[in-house]
Image: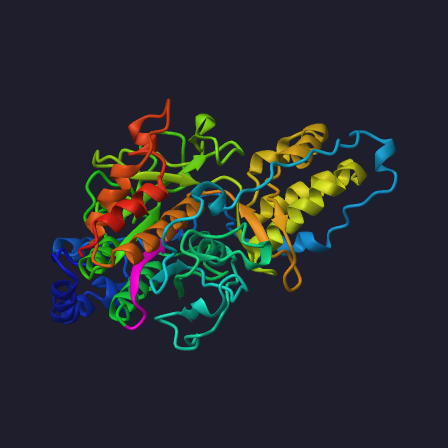
Amino acid sequence: MPTKAKDREQANQQLEEARPMIEDLGVEITRNISSAGAVAARATEEQQAALKKAGFQVINDKKIRLLPKGWLKSPKALEALSTFDFFDPFAPFRRPAPAPVERPRDGEGASDYIGELPTTGKGVGIAIIDSGVEAHPDFGERFLGNVSPIQANRPYKVAKDPVGHGTHVAGDAAGDGRLSNGRFRGPAHDANIIGIQVLDESEYQTDVSQALEEFTSGIDWMVNNREKYNIKVANLSLSMPLMSEGGGFYGPELLYDPIGAAINRAVQAGITVVAAAGNSGPDQGSIDGTPAINDNVITVGALDTNGTPQDRRDDSVAEFSSRGPTPDGRLKPDILAPGVKIVAPNAPGSEIDSQNSLFAKVREAVPHMNGRQLAGVAYKMVEAGVLPEDVLHMDIRDLHDLFAYGLDVQPTQGQWKDGAAYIGMDGTSMASPIVTGVVAAMLEANPDLTPAQVKQILVGTADPVRGESRVAQGAGAINARKAVEVALRSRRG
C-alpha cells in the first residue's frame, strides 16, 4: 500500500504520519517495505475504499511471476516425475510406434557470436540480480559470493543457486569457459561477479509485497556497496508486472513503480543497468513489465542466429522475444543479442538442471512407453506447470509426438559435480547478460562512461536485422567489437 508521494523518502514519511489513521480504520499493517515506500497490510474492501479516499494507492497483494514466461510455476510438483515408471518392455510392439532419433540443434556460446574483444572487463564488478550464483569453476576467484539483503540467515559469500537461472546468466556475461577450453566464454571473462539473490526455488510465484521488498532491497544494497566492489553494471533478467491504482496490473496509467525508482537511483549513482525484454512475443506491445520499460535501462531482446552465429544473413528476432512499444508508446527493446540455445555454466541439481534432465529422460523413454504411461507423464507435467492443461485432452498418438519432438530438451556439455558443466537455455534472460558482459568490457576500456553514454554507444553501433521492425529489434543486433572500440577511442588521454 504505497502513497502518492513523488519519492521513497516522502512516501515513508507520509506512511509513518498516517499510521494512527490507518490503524483507526482497523487495517492491520503486516510489514513495512521502507525500501519501496510502502507497507503490506490486511484490509477489507470497505477499508481499501477508505484508504483510497485518504490518498493512498492500494495494490492487491496477488501472486506474480518473477522469472520470464516459460519457466516452471511449481518446481516441487515436478519431483514426482523423477520416480515415475517410464518403461514398458512391450510398448515397442504396440502403438504408438517408436520415435526416430532426432539430433537436436547444437548450442552456441556467447563467444561464438561476440568473438574476442580488445578488453575483457578486468576489475569491473558485475551485479547479477537473480536467483543467486553457484561457485562454478568458470568463475574462479572472480566470483565474490552471493548476498540476500533482506534475509539475515543467508550470509554473504554463500555460493548457492537453487534455481540455476542466475548461474547461467552470470556465465553468459562473465564465465571464462575453463571447463570447455574457452569455448563457452562470456564477453567479460575477467570481470568480478557479485550475486544478489532476490529469488529462490520457492518464488517462481510470489506475493507483490515480497517481490517489491526483495527487488528494491537488492538494488539498494548494490548502490550502497558499489564502491567497495567496483560495481559498474547490473543485470536483471527478471520482471514484475506493472501496477496501477486500484490494484490492477497493466493499467493505462502507471502510477507506482518502486522498482523503476530504485533502478533510477542506481543509474544516478553511475551503475549501468541492463534488463531482459521478456519472453512474451511475438505480439507487439508485449514489453509490459518493469524494469524492461524503464527509459534508463538498456532493454535487450533475443536474436536467433539459426545456428550460424558467424553468419548474420539468416539472423532474425526470436519468436518468443517480447516486442514494443511500451504501454505508453515508447520504443523498446533497445538492442538485440543472441538468446536461443545459449550454452553457459550449469548448476547441477538446480531446478533448471533437473527439469532438463527429466525432459531428456522422457524423450528417450517415448519408444518404451505405453498409452497409460504417456497419459500419466502428461498429467504430472501439467501438475508441475510445464505443460498446459490442453495436453490432457490430446489423444495418445499426439501425446507421443509431443514427448518425442515437442519437449524443449536443451544441449548439455561436459561434466561437473554430479551433472553437466554447461547447459543450453533460451530466452531474453540469456541475451541480456551477453550485453551486460559487453558493457563491462566497455567500462574497462573507459571507466568514465556514464550509463547514458554506454547506451548511446551500444545503440549507435548496433547492426540492423534485415526484415525486422523497429519494435521487434530496436536499434538492431549488438556489435560488440565496434562498441568497445568506440569506448576505447572516447577515453581521455
Where does residue 47 sit, x and y in percent of width and height?
22, 58
- Dividing the picture into quadrants, the one containing residue 280 is top left
Q: Position of residue 435 (x, y in %)?
A: 36, 47
Q: How many discs mark residues in the rendered view? A: 0
Q: What's the image's color scheme? A: rainbow
- Does the image show residue 238? no
Q: Main secondary structure of the magenta part?
A: strand
The N terminus: image quadrant: bottom left
Compared with residue 166, is residue 398 higher up or lower down, i.e. above or below? above
- Nearest the viewer among 475 and 249 is 475
| The C terminus lies in quadrant | bottom left
Extent of the magenta region: 228-237
On the picture, is 78 further left or further right than 262?
A: right
Q: Is residue 339 above or below residue 33?
A: above
Residue 335 image-quadrant placement = top left
Q: Residue at horizontal 54%, vertical 50%?
A: 183
